[in-house]
Image: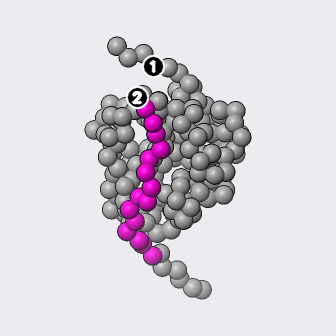
Amino acid sequence: MGCTVQQYLDIHHPFAPVFDSTSRVLVLGTFPSVQSRANAFYYGHPQNRFWPVLAALFGAAVPSSVEEKTDLLLTHHVALWDVLASCDIAGSADGSIRNPVPNDLSKLLGQAPIHSVFTNGQTAAALYRRWSQPQNSVPMVALPSTSPANARCTLEILIAAWKPLWQSATKETVKF
């Protein structure tokens, strides 16, 4: 019986956040997967349900290109980034993360009227609570992971669980 050794790589986040001056909600993942890094955009694994969930919530077609994905996000006032700027990671598993360094969310939060943060999974939620939430006052809602590793959640369960994102993104906030 062979023994596999996990190879850890020190990786820095390879792409910018997606947001504009009309973004109302921020979705934070943990860190881009191997396939996302190879594709140079978020949620690049073909089995990840992130894009089908968002498309269902907003009554849109599932986007395939980076441009279509960006358009889906920005049209519906959704910003997208990850909690971590860099880390040591073996493959794509959140559970393998070592030496996490958080992204500085202050610039994004200062340029967009974000009123809610939603995390894609419990690891992103825990990292946000530890590293980012103490520096800002934006409330966070932890949503179930859209990762294929979260096989216990069907697409239908994910769509229902992610409905608060839709509600928050479509709700206008009044600033005094």
**In the image, which residues are magenta?**
7-21
> Image quadrant for the N terminus?
bottom right
Residue situated in front as seen by the camera: 31 or 37: 37
Residue that lies at the very extreme toward the left in this rendered image: 135
> Is residue 11 magenta-colored?
yes
Residue that appears at 39% across and 53% down: 84
Q: For the residue marked with disc 2, what is the amino acid?
A: Pro
What x and y, as percent, mark residue 40?
A: 52, 59
Mark 1 Cα shell of 10 Å, populated few (<14), some (14-19), many (≥20): few
Q: Mark 1 points at which residue?
A: 173
Residue 134: image location, x then y, percent: 29, 38
The residue to which callout 2 is attached is: 113
Tell whether position 8 is magenta: yes
Colouring chosen for the image of the structure? one colour
Identify residue type, mark 1. Thr
Residue shown at 37%/31% (left/top)? 138
Task: Evaluate if marks 1 and 2 touch, with contact meaning CB atoms under 8 Å apart.
Answer: yes
In the image, taking residue 151 as reference, residue 105 lies left or right, namely: left
SS assignment at label 2? loop
